[in-house]
Image (cartoon, helix red, strand yellow):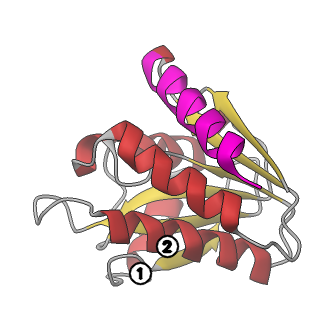
């Protein structure tokens, strides 16, 4: 499976599946969720919220509406806004469950952000290490391309460096 790090706005990406950095309520507020909601339309937020709340580490799948994707996988790496922070285990589970949900739907490409980092309170390089490791260890069925997207220059440099280190030590 090809694994790359890219820089940009997740809402501008083209893939079978885009992963939303969600809270357990699935309400699409700011950050990645806000970018996806603004680009897809309010229907995405309404559809996501109708599937919630979900447990920490779980995922819910919706249509992508106006986004250039078939699905949005809402990965709950953090509790509902204001109810705590992401943990290493919630990031690990949310990442693994997002990959599995994409595979179950026959998706070949997926774009994933830094789940649980930023507003969710988990330190970026540690969170990126978890996400990169889960992707690196994952045995796909249909997925052939995973892109880890970073928004800012600083975030991109951190994620790129972490991804290179994880890939280097992989057999």
Query: What secondary structure is marked by label 2?
Result: helix
Relative horizontal placement of residue 27, taking residue 158 as reference (left or right): left
Relative horizontal placement of residue 140, taking residue 21 as reference (left or right): right
Q: Position of residue 39 (x, y in %)?
A: 57, 41
Relative horizontal placement of residue 82, taking residue 64 as reference (left or right): left
Relative horizontal placement of residue 137, taking residue 91 as reference (left or right): right
Range of residues picked out in magenta: 154-171
Query: What secondary structure is marked by label 1?
Result: helix
Position of 60 relative to 7 (above/below): below
Q: Nearer the viewer, residue 84 or 42?
A: 84
Seen at 47% across and 20% down, the residue is 152
Answer whether residue 24 is visible to the viewer in this image: yes
Say which quadrant the C terminus sits in. bottom right
Give the CA separation, mark 1 to mark 2: 5 Å
Q: Position of residue 102 (x, y in %)?
A: 72, 72
Position of 130 relative to 79 (above/below): above
Answer with the quarter of the image where residue 167 lies: top right
Q: Residues within 10 Å of mark 2 (few under 14, many from 20)?
A: some
Seen at 59% across and 63% down, the residue is 134
Residue on which disc 1 sits: 50
């Amino acid at each position: 499976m090809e694994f790359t790090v890219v820089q940009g706005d997740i809402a501008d990406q083209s893939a079978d599946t885009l992963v939303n950095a969600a809270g357990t309520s699935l309400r699409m507020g700011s950050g990645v969720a806000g970018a996806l909601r603004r680009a897809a339309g309010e229907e995405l937020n309404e559809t996501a919220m109708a599937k919630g709340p979900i447990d920490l580490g779980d995922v819910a799948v919706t249509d992508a509406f106006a986004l250039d994707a078939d699905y949005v996988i809402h990965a709950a790496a953090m509790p509902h806004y204001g109810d705590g922070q992401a943990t290493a285990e919630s990031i690990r589970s949310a990442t693994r469950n997002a990959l599995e949900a994409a595979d179950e739907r026959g998706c070949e490409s997926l774009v994933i952000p830094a789940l649980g980092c930023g507003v969710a309170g988990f330190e970026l390089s540690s969170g990126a290490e978890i996400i990169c490791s889960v992707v690196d260890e994952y045995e796909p069925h249909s997925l052939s391309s995973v892109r880890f997207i970073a928004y800012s220059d600083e975030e991109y440099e951190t994620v790129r460096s972490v991804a290179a280190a994880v890939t280097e030590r992989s057999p």
